Amino acid sequence: FIGEERVAAELGPMMRAAPEESMRIFLCTQIADEARHVAFFDRFYSEVGVLQAGDLAGRLQETSEHLNPEFGVLFDEMLKRRVDRLAVEPEDLEALVEAVTIYHMVIEGMLALTGQHFIMDYNERVGTLPAFVQGFTLVARDEHRHVAFGARFLRDMTQRDPRYAEAI
């Protein structure tokens, strides 16, 4: 939930830095996906009453209290440093390759999808929260699409210039 909200803001500079129109278009669709994911989780937390806060900003703040320091390193240091660089120098394709690696492959591919599948599997086995599992399945479908974009983008960039392999 908190990661979805943070990353939606980071995708703008990545989208503007993408070297091809098709890449920019995909990243625009991903921004919409991330906003939809925030709305899904916000509605879940609001209706199920998992969190005490009465609005989105409060729920985001409340979930932030449960984050470990490594979350901050990954999002607020590693990813943000590359995205901030892209905001001032969008032609820095090495920074874009690094940002896509961190976001699409590590955050979405390794962390998000792993956690999502664990949560969905648990709830399906014990028979709880069927509507949540259905919605979360749709979120996971989007994440798979994002990871596929990242993998293709990184492949294309290393074919364009082998030096990007080192950045990855």
Image (cartoon, rainbow, N blue to C red):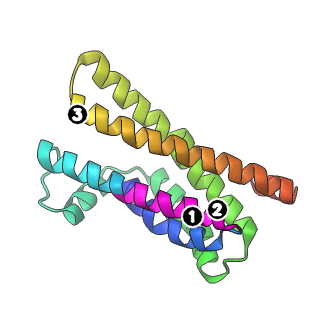
Residue at the farthest right position? 162
Question: Would you say 135 lies left or right of 81 here?
Answer: left
Residue 131's image quarter? top left
Q: At 54% across and 67% down in the image, what residue appears?
A: 80
Residue 160's image quarter? bottom right
Question: Would you say 89 lies left or right of 26 here?
Answer: right
- Where disc 1 sits, the SS reads helix
Q: Give the answer, above or below, for where 39 lies relative to 50.
A: below
Question: Would you say 13 lies left or right of 113 here?
Answer: right
Taking the magenta stretch, the answer to whether it contains residue 59 is no
Say whether residue 1 is visible.
Answer: no
Residue 25 is tagged as 1
Q: Amino acid at mark 3?
A: Ala
Q: Give the answer, above or below, for where 133 lies relative to 147.
A: above
Q: Nearer the viewer, residue 72 or 154?
A: 154
Q: Nearer the viewer, residue 9 or 155?
A: 155
Residue 91, position as x, y percentages in the image? 72, 77
Residue at the farthest bottom position? 88
Distance from label 1 to label 3 (Cα)? 31 Å
Q: Amino acid at mark 2?
A: Ser
Q: Amino acid at mark 1?
A: Ile
* Residue labelled with disc 3: 131
Residue 68, position as x, y percentages in the image? 41, 49
- Where disc 2 sits, the SS reads helix
* Residue labelled with disc 2: 22
Q: Which residues are magenta?
A: 20-35
